[in-house]
Image (cartoon, rainbow, N blue to C red):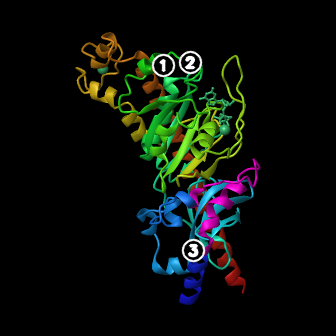
């Protein structure tokens, strides 16, 4: 057994150099096989192992026993397709069939960024490791959650200096990111097309704890301040509407065209949903970058803490209201309304907070109910199975 493990480790080390290159050439057929030049293998510091470069951390290591390590191999999910998922580990990348107990529960099945344990012999996934962070949203038009990504460290909330810019939507993304405990930065693209940058800075003055970077996403130098979010071993997600320039940012940060980009509609600045799949890309400074399709809707559920953190200023003001159950409407001595009247706080922000609170409460209740129904159904199936076993034994 030990010999087999040692042998596979040596093979793994020999294959490390091909890891990033093969990964990139497998991304959805855009410039398949394009030369990656000085790829991640050239810029990864010597002290960083291939797994660490993929975001492997003590948090995941601690979930494995010595026996697990000899039997199973940890791999990261880079892309999820209908019938197979793309994974990468220290022995390079491979495709795994979407099949077996790990994939049965729709709400729990592996998503991009997850770490799985593959059986070293059969190459079948046997376990999903606990996640350090998870993004999910209400599936549009359905009463269930849709997983967006797991184990992300940093997030760029991407918007543009045009019709797309919408503070209430930014606050929606922030609630999601803060719930997951990730570091966030707001990137305003297309700063080269609108010189009135003060307008955006002014609108954002109530968000002093949110770093904001205005960029021309087409320009490598302009995006340089964003490199600190995708250092080797870090996982960065780009989230935002279609057409804001997520794939353009990915290409500029990578220094090579890894993903296709598309134009936007002239009249309302909306994009054309060019990116169709969520997928991770290894970029030359060693970090992993998640490019995703633009989201039309981001219904929030199970993000109460993230929401409270996003609107912490309102809660702080509410502590000074005269009545403990103040609804911040017409009550005398309301500190929130006083802040709005004096221009310290925007009324829009209060309205958005109320709207998101209602939405989170409603959706979280729907999900809790769906989980309870699933549990009841599971118990029912198990009891039917055990009954039929009892009958069978009696007959035998
Ligand atoms: N001038 C200028 N054009 C940009 C900038 N960022 C993106 N674009 C253009 O905007 C269009 C949309 O960019 P994409 O990168 O495809 O947008 P996306 O967010 O990936 O869109 P989806 O894949 O549809 O979600 C392309 O034509 C880009 O060239 C920018 O900062 N300045
Ligand atoms: Mg795109
Ligand atoms: Zn009040």
Distance from disc 2 to disc 1, alpha carbons, whole Å, reads: 7 Å
Q: Position of residue 308 (x, y in %)?
A: 37, 35
Position of 276 relative to 108 (above/below): above
| Residue at left offset 24%, top offset 15% | 333
Query: What residue span does the magenta drawing correspond to?
Result: 13-41
Q: Which mark is residue 365?
A: none
- Residue for badge 3: 13
- Residue for badge 1: 197
Distance from disc 3 to disc 2, alpha carbons, whole Å, reads: 49 Å
Q: Which mark is residue 194?
A: 2
- The answer to whether the residue bearing label 3 lies less than 8 angstroms from the nearest atom of ligand 2 is no
Where does ligand 2 appear, by image quarter?
top right
Q: Is residue 331 left or right of residue 234?
A: left
Q: Is residue 153 magenta?
A: no
Q: In this orientation, does residue 303 appear?
A: no
Is 84 in front, or is 35? 35
Position of 312 relative to 131 (above/below): above
Is 69 in front, or is 311? 69
Q: Which quadrant of the view contains residue 132?
A: bottom left
Q: Position of residue 43 (x, y in %)?
A: 53, 57
Q: Secondary structure at mark 1?
A: helix
Q: Residues within 10 Å of mark 2 (few under 14, many from 20)?
A: few
The residue lying furthest to the top in this view is 341
Is 270 in front, or is 109? 270
- Along the polypeptide, which appears first: circle 3 or circle 2? 3
Question: Do callouts 2 and 1 mark residues in contact (Cβ within 8 Å)?
Answer: yes
Q: Secondary structure at mark 2?
A: loop
Q: Which quadrant of the view contains residue 386?
A: bottom right
């Amino acid at each position: 057994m030990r010999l087999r493990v040692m042998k596979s480790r040596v093979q793994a080390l020999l294959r490390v150099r091909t890891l990033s290159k093969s990964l990139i050439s497998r991304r959805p057929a855009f410039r398949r096989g394009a030369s990656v030049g000085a790829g991640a293998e050239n810029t990864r510091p010597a002290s960083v192992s291939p797994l660490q470069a993929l975001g492997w951390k003590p948090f995941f290591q601690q979930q494995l026993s010595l026996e697990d390590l000899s039997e199973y191999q940890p791999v990261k999910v880079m892309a999820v397709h209908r019938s197979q998922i793309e994974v990468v580990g220290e022995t390079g990348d491979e495709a795994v069939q979407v099949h077996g107990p790990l994939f049965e529960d729709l709400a729990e099945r592996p998503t991009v960024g997850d770490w799985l344990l593959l059986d070293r012999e059969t190459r079948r996934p046997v376990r999903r490791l606990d996640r350090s962070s998870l993004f999910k949203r209400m599936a549009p038009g359905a009463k269930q959650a849709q997983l967006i990504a797991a184990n992300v460290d940093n997030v760029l909330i991407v918007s543009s200096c045009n019709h797309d810019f919408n503070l209430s939507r930014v606050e929606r993304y922030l609630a999601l990111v803060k719930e997951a405990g990730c570091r966030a930065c707001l990137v305003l693209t297309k700063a080269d097309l609108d010189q009135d940058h003060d307008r955006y800075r002014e609108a954002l003055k109530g968000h002093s704890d949110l770093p904001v970077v205005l960029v021309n996403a087409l320009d490598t130098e302009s995006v340089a301040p964003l490199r600190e979010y995708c250092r080797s071993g870090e996982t960065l997600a780009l989230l935002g509407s279609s057409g804001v320039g997520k794939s353009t940012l990915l290409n500029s940060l990578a220094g090579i065209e890894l993903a296709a980009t598309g134009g936007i509609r002239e009249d309302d600045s909306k994009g054309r949903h060019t990116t169709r799949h969520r997928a991770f890309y290894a970029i030359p400074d060693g970090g992993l970058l998640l490019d995703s399709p633009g989201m039309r809707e981001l219904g929030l559920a199970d993000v109460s803490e993230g929401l409270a953190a996003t609107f912490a200023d309102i809660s702080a003001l509410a502590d000074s209201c005269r009545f403990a159950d103040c609804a911040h409407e017409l009550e005398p001595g309301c500190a929130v309304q006083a802040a709005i009247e004096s221009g310290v706080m925007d009324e829009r922000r209060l309205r958005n907070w109320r709207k998101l609170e209602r939405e989170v409460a409603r959706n979280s209740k729907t999900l809790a109910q769906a989980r309870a129904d699933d549990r009841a159904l599971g118990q029912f199936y198990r009891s039917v199975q055990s009954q039929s076993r009892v009958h069978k034994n009696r007959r035998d």
